[in-house]
Image (tube, coloured by chain):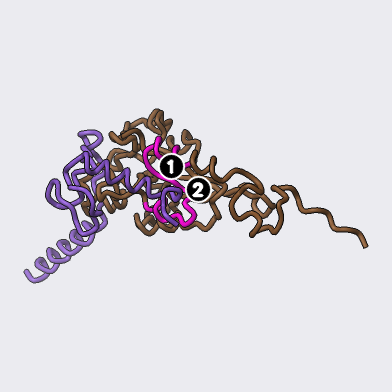
Chain colours: A purple, B brown
Amino acid sequence: MSRRALALAGIAVSVTLLAACSEKPQTNTHGVKFDAVPWSGTGSQANTGTVFTSPGWKVGDKTTWEQQIKTRMNGQNEYVKEN
Amino acid sequence: MARMKFVCDTERCIECNGCVTACKNENEVPWGVNRRRVVTLNDGVPGEKSISVACMHCSDAPCMAVCPVQCFYRTEEGVVLHDKDVCIGCGYCSYACPFGAPQFPSQGTFGVRGKMDKCTFCAGGPEANGSEAEFEKYGRNRLAEGKLPACAEMCSTKALLAGDGDVVADIFRTRVVHRGKGAEVWGWGTAYGSQQAGNPPATEVKR
């Protein structure tokens, strides 16, 4: 009886160990997944930001996001900066 | 907004590889994968030129055209992205891309070619914005944080510009008009001590 229990325990341990060797699922039957728009922010809730979100725009508002990106783009032009 | 583009000014790029490091750090790109790299022409020869290269987010992307599983898509901002859950790692895109942007990490004990990885314009991918899954697969989503790609924002000489194609083209045009060429360039006299306007140095007088 104890032999049988031991064998069963051994099998259970083997199965558990082998399960760790399995691969992550790589299939997606629905094709390319939906990608959220950038102005929806990076917070866990929709239309929220995180501490990494740049100030100067309202998360969820496309117009302010575009303005924010445009400001940063023009920040690359040192000819408009005061030296 | 038009289309997001990169422009690299070869007159300014000093081959510091700051963009490469910024990209690697920001997106925690694995060893052997270089989403961005600096290419130098005539390395070591006076007048050498360097250019920072990554995915150029083509308007008519050849990678997208040849992909057999249609894993690529283009966002509203013109950023070319792909779904790693659909990608089969066949490598067709790497043959089609004229910039060598698609990268393939070696995975597992035998170094099996993994799924394609490339520059995302710091726009993440088809996972929830800012999620762990997005970061693991595609890296940071800086666009959704109201920022531009880390490589361009880190560039110390502002050789690498990122953003709306019209805006970066305007910035580049302004530069070219202002800086002129040869001895007209600001700082030429300080750097070279003469007004020789890009001519080779005068030959030494024989003793």
> Mark 2 = which residue?
B52
Work out whether A73 lies above or below B16: above
Foreground: B36 or A12? B36
- Of label 1 and label 2, which has the lower sequence position? 1
Q: Amino acid at mark 1?
A: Phe
User: Label 1: few (<14), some or many (≥20) within 10 Å?
Assistant: many
- Which chain is home to disc 2? B
Q: Amino acid at mark 2?
A: Ser
Q: Residue at x 42, y 53 (%)?
A: B111
> Mark 1 = which residue?
B6
Is label 1 in a helix, a strand or a loop? strand
In the visual, does B99 lie left or right of B200? left
Residue B144 shows up from this direction: yes
The magenta region covers: B150-172
User: Label 2: few (<14), some or many (≥20) within 10 Å?
Assistant: many
Q: Would you say the residues marked 1 and 2 are in contact, meaning their CB atoms lie under 8 Å apart?
A: yes
